[in-house]
Amino acid sequence: MNEFSGWMFDLYDDPARGVAVWWITDDGRRLCTGHAFPVRFFAAGGAARLAELAHWLNRLPDPPACRLEEQRDLFLPQPLTVLAVEADSPTAQAQLFKQTERAFPDLTYYDADVATPLRYTARFGAFPLARCRVQLGAEDEIERLEVLDERWDLQPQPAPLRVLELEPDCNPASGTPRALLAHCGRHTCRFDLRQARATLINLRGLLVQEDPDVILSEYGDTWLLPELLRMAEEQGMALPLSRDLRRKAAHKKELTYFSYGQIVYRGQQTLLFGRWHLDRRNAMLWDDYALEGALETARITCLPVQTAARTSPGTGISSMQIVTALQNGILVPWHKQQAERPKTALDLLHRDLGGLVYQPRVGVHGPVGAVDFISMYPSVMVKANISPEVPLPNGLEPASDQPGLIPQTLAPLLEKRVALKRKIAALPKWHPRRKRFEALASAHKWLLVTCFGYLGYKNARFGRIESHEAVTAGGREAVLRAKEAAEDLGFEVLHIFVDGLWVQKPGCSTPADFSPILDEILQRTGLPAALDGVYRWVVFLPSCQDARVPVGNRYFGVFQDGSLKVRGIEARRRDTPPWIKAVQMEIVQHLAGAQSPAELPDFLPGALSIVRRALAALSAGRVPLADLLLAQRLTREVKDYTTPSPAARAAAQLEAMGKHIRPGQRVRFVWTRGLPGVHAWDLPTPPDPAEVDCVRYRTMLLRAASTVLQPLGIQRETLYQYCCGAVEQNLWQIPKRLNPQLQMSYLI
DNA sequence: TACAGTCGGGG
DNA sequence: GTGTACGACTGTA
């Protein structure tokens, strides 16, 4: 009897065997098995129409089994009579459904377009990298499958992955790579790309001898792998990138789509079979932890690792919801058919999208405690049991104690994240495991964040706009209760922003001084809150347009451990050149030396000299061009701009060189003098340093500097005169000591 | 001054 | 394949 235990590695449709499942066994083998996997989809509609469908199916050359059943549609109170159609394999199901839908477009379909790995998890409990015990039959097909661990384990036994790293010697977007660097185990090789044949032979040697599980690349999706496959074709050679030799690499086309209110560009992808290809540059947010992040996202979402690594907002959480639905015997709608319930005037009256934002008290404050709800919106969904099929809660009070689909999906994820956070807090900053946990926590974070928005998305399978609104209402309720809690404990609430409160009380300066608030908040809301930290000082900035108007999301400060937090200012923006970011952060870092608001003026002279030195470096041409680069996203085709943005003008330059930039792609450029005012970075010729628009960069720097210096009484004009004007610097009286309270009223 | 275009925010 | 906010801010006409 062939039995083994190991990690589930990869899974995909296999027309002949049902699904192909790859394993890394405990004794180190890489094994491909088949698994018979008949799957069903359902059709709903009038009885007569369903009978016609059954008749039509029976007359197909290879008629599938079908029968009438009662199933549950999440949005319907009563069970629904459906025709269940069973196909021999996922491949057959996809084909059969396509035919069926074409012949009977008027019916409502369920479980029709569910990704096979999700069905597999729902049926057998196995997920990517699950530890399993497997019993095989004579043809290496799975006969019995026992899953030994859970998606929610904090420290699953790591699979012994063999990694081959591949990267070109430069960014193919801006130059022509000459060499390919390969790193695998003990070997590091450099292949000359101009010698195609030798490179391919060597690379094939590496693949065969080392048999890596993962190809971890830079630019592998957008350039390297397609290029290698093209070279192989040209040379008439086989390049076994996929471990499954029957399968070639799969290519997914580039795509531009709307998400999160903006256009997103996703480059093309190259996916392998029996081996993973992960492109570090194409993995969502993880950088150094591309692999860890992808593995965790795969465990949680049940999506294959290669998909999980590249998946876009919504897909991950949607996958989790689908798995929950399948496990609970709830039908998964094909597309989304639910229309919004018409709203009453009263609904509209109560309707206020978004979070609660207070007007902060502008100026310098300290010490200040920052209290945040932990994953507020997901916590609200779980606490108030908000789900499309559950009656709406009253504030934070759930209308039913039978957990809905969404809370069921979220609760274990939230728990896992909180447990991770707790572990992170207990580990010292340098600890390697802390880094790992942080990578995992950040993988969870955006799944949770997306889940909230996804509730309100009209095309989500399990979304409902009213639920979405109930979440924001619950959030506001929670924050208001938190405010009352803090005030009842004698704290002054300086500012509220969506899920965070900034509070202050004379004599309170240590975390312990603020912790009673956390308990009180938990008491009154049932939601967990945490102390983000205690600020030595924090500055809430006024609007740039009107210094009398505070804005909720522009602030910066320094915590007692010396770490900085800045929000909404230039340094946080992705269209700010690195040089400007760096100087602005250097100023804040310098100001961080102040232990209290009262000490801040002592650090003004140093801050001003940072600005002067930076400007001197700029005019002396000592700032590297790369540090003056900025990137902006195209929001439409270049020709569709009425007034071309700088990015559009840079894109036009690239277009003239035959390089088309798609909406959603970022364009990098430097500001230059004269017209068109920009020089695209990815042009074959770099900008002439003499062309750089130094005046503009100086203005931008002064603007960024004055943002962080204005609480010290330095206005933009003053800074300009001081740094660039004719006034001798030593004639300037630097204010020695400002009363922060006075300063505050001045700014207000 | 008005309008067009881009960004953040959740951590 | 999946959030078509909302408001602050900057650049251009």
Image: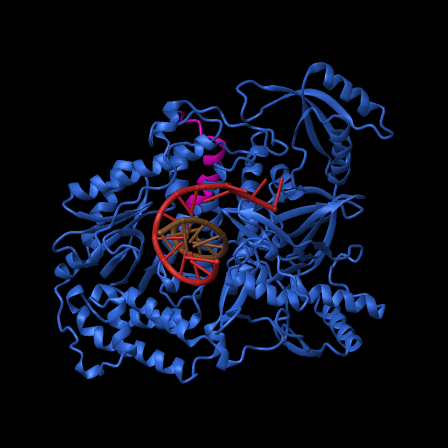
Chain colours: A blue, B brown, C red
Seen at 47% across and 30% down, the residue is A404
**Residue A65's quadrant in the figure?**
top right
The image position of residue A350, as x and y in percent, is: 35, 29
Q: Is residue A33 left or right of residue A430?
A: right
Q: Residue furthest top?
A: A48
The image position of residue A280, as x and y in percent, is: 58, 63
Q: Is residue A684 left or right of residue A449?
A: right
Seen at 61% across and 51% down, the residue is A256
Q: Nearer the viewer, residue A559 or A586?
A: A586
Q: Nearer the viewer, residue A686 or A560?
A: A686
Q: Nearer the viewer, residue A3 or A510?
A: A510
Seen at 33% across and 67% down, the residue is A703
Q: How many marks?
A: 0
Seen at 25% across and 36% down, the residue is A524
The quadrant of the picture occupied by the C terminus of chain A is bottom left
Q: Main secondary structure of the magenta part?
A: helix
Q: Residue furthest right?
A: A61
Q: Based on the picture, tell me whether residue A411 belongs to the magenta stretch.
A: yes
Q: Is residue A511 left or right of residue A462?
A: left
**Residue A716's quadrant in the figure?**
bottom left
Magenta residues, start to end: A400-415
The image position of residue A341, as x and y in percent, is: 49, 24
